[in-house]
Amino acid sequence: MAATWTYSDWITQPYGATRLSRLRLHIQEVSEKVSEEMAADGQSSSSNAVEKYLESLRKTEVEEARLCGGAPTAAGVTGRALHVNVSGFRE
């Protein structure tokens, strides 16, 4: 049975945080599919095609994060935040 992906539309999103978020959600659902296939009989029986697809998505995530200003790290990809000090601000 073919998998139905909820977040496979990530690629149709404009470049930016929304696109990256949807890509990460898609990576999660593909990861879960790989885990399901492996857990079904307690052996590593996941589709090689799904695993290769997951690997390509993870590489794409790094590139998308760079486009969004993120930086790849050993643990994955992190975003960058801009902090601005505002002098004279009063509540």
Image: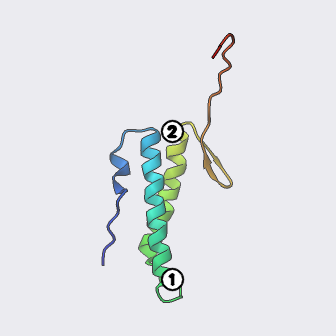
Q: Are marks 2 and 1 in contact (CB under 8 Å)?
A: no
Q: What amino acid type is highlighted by mark number 2?
A: Leu
Which residue lies at the image location 30% right of the left edge and 79% below the top edge? 1
Question: Where 82 sits versus 61, above or below?
Answer: above
Disc 1: which residue: 39
Label 2 residue SS: helix
Tell me how the rendering is colored. Answer: rainbow
Between disc 2 and disc 1, the foreground one is: 1
Q: Determine crowd level at label 2: few under 14, some 14-19, many 20+ residues with C-alpha closer than 10 A.
A: some
Residue at position x 62%, y 28% from top? 82
25 lies left or right of 85: left
Q: Is residue 71 left or right of residue 18?
A: right
Q: Residue at x 43, y 58 (%)?
A: 26
Q: Residue furthest front?
A: 91
When the figure is inspected, residue 59 is found, relative to residue 91, above or below; the finding is: below
Q: x, y percentage for residue 48?
A: 45, 76
Q: Say which mark, if any, is on residue 67.
A: 2
Q: Amino acid at mark 1?
A: Ala
Question: In the figure, 69 relative to 58: above or below?
Answer: above
Give the alpha-carbon distance from disc 2 to disc 1, as whole Å.
35 Å
Expressed as whole percent of the image width and height from the top left, the position of residue 52 reads 47, 68
Check disc 1 and report its element: helix, strand or loop: helix
